[in-house]
Image: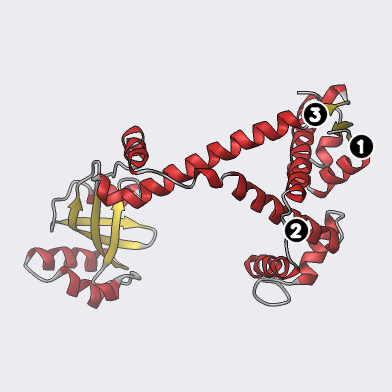
Amino acid sequence: MARIAGEPVTRAEFEAYLESFPDKGGASALHPDPVSRTVRADRLAEYIERRLFLREAGKQGIRISDEDLAARIGALFSSAPSGANGPGGGQSELEAALAARGMPLEEWKRRVREDMLIERLIARAGAGGADIAEEQMREYFSAHPDLFRRPEQFTVRQIVVADQSLADKMVRRVKEGASFELLAREHSIGPEAAAGGLMGTFSRGDLPSAFEEAILPLKPRQTSGVVKTEFGYHVFKLDGRIPGGMPRFADVRQQVRDLAAAEKREAAFQKWKKNLLESAHVEILDPSLRP
């Protein structure tokens, strides 16, 4: 189907790649309609790129030890959904899932090792972008204001009870001078009752619209009327507002550095990848899969 620096890419190995990853255009991509041909062309480009990366990792002497591979597999097990083998599932669940995709366990482990090789290669290729000068950080900050501009925020408390009459009573008690926080501790059925009803600090759009319609018109330390929802009858208190706007550079300097460095690493990697692909002498022999 293709050649990479003279090395063949056979139809059998490409089809095996597709069928092992049905979510990447496997079984459905076997049908010769125009959409699936596009999918197959994309997956072939992906497969060629993967082969090139692994070839380059070998040239650069990048290796994955058995200990590192075991650690990665252990982490994948622990992050999997719970199953018959306890939290994180286990090997039997994994083997069953792989069998459904037609992939033996050892083949999956080989793919995991390859993924780790590619990750290390990419990290090395982008390493040149890690150093960011102060002037570059300030330029990035000025050029990307939307990444750092903060929306107005508000801090809010609530009392939520099961019936209207008690909610009305809470509103009256607060107006008479009772402590909202104490009433929340004594009467609220909400999860934040023990904290005096403190829900937290939010931006516009974070809370349900029914809540915000009652909260946003309030001034600091004001209390809302009763708001009915499926959870009960709510009374809100606005503790305060935090103005939005652009922060000072000094206050977000580390965030600026991280974002600017990530962008520079990505640019360095993309340049390296472009050079690698251009020097690889890739030939697509199947006319239907050419870009």
Q: Dot 3 lies on which element?
A: loop
Question: Is 150 rendered above or below residue 109?
Answer: above
Identify the residue shown where x is 28% and y is 44%.
Answer: 151
**Which SS class for mark 1?**
helix
3D distance between C-alphas at marks 2 and 1: 23 Å
Sequence-wise first label, 1 or 3: 1
Query: Mark on residue 281?
Result: 3
N-terminal label among 2 and 1: 1
Question: Is 24 in front, or is 114?
Answer: 114
Quadrant hosting residue 174? bottom left
Q: Separation of disc 3 and disc 2 at Cα? A: 26 Å
Amino acid on which the number 3 mark rests in the picture: His
- Tell me the tag on residue 113: 2
Q: Residue furthest left?
A: 176
Instruction: Tell me if 26 is positioned left or right of 12 in this view.
Output: left
In percent of width and height, residue 105 lies at 84, 63
Amino acid type at mark 2: Arg
- Which label is found at residue 11? 1
Indicate which disc, 3 or 2, sits on the residue closer to the N terminus: 2
> For the residue marked with disc 1, what is the amino acid?
Arg
* Residue nearest the viewer, comparing 106 with 63: 63
